[in-house]
Amino acid sequence: QVQLVESGGGLVQAGGSLRLSCAASGRTFSSYAMGWFRQAPGKEREFVSRISWSGGSTYYADSVKGRFTISRDNAKNTVYLQMNSLKPEDTAVYYCAARLSRVGPGTRRDEYDYWGQGTQVTVSS
């Protein structure tokens, strides 16, 4: 069982930056691949980024590539999402998720076993 708690969301102007954190409970955090998803009002939850259990492999949605960076600190049981050059279309609730399986691309919601409660990111124009 893994519990995930996101933090770091807020209101920022377009072009600004935020760093989201996702703290995980449990002693097996390093066994899980982690992902970030987001859900804007009236839209489905979409993939943003994912990172392998070791941190050696990362992947991004085209919409955030070059602007967002995912990282993890297994000693702190935490995964991060550094978001730069934010745009109004990045406004959404951001969720972190954990998955034990190492099979599959890690870009689909149904691949993940555990989810956090989400943190709101609002980007004003």
Image (cartoon, rainbow, N blue to C red):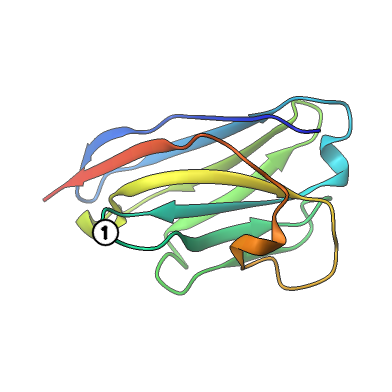
Identity of the residue furthest to the left in this view? 125
Quarter of the view holding residue 39: bottom left
Query: For the point 23% across and 38% down, which residue is it?
Result: 12
Label 1: state its secondary structure. Answer: loop
Amino acid type for the residue under numbered disc 1: Gly
Q: Which residue is at 26% across, 59% downward? A: 42
Left or right position of 25 against 10: right
Asked whether 17 or 110 is in front, the reply is 110
- The residue wearing badge 1 is 42
Up/down of 56 relative to 11, above or below: below
Q: Is residue 10 left or right of residue 101?
A: left
Q: What percent of the width, then of the height, locates residue 10?
A: 31, 32
**Left or right for 27, reference 55:** right
Q: Is residue 104 above or below residue 102?
A: below
In this view, the residue in front, 41 or 35, is 41
Give residue 111's position: percent from left, percent from top: 71, 62
Q: Quadrant of the N terminus?
A: top right
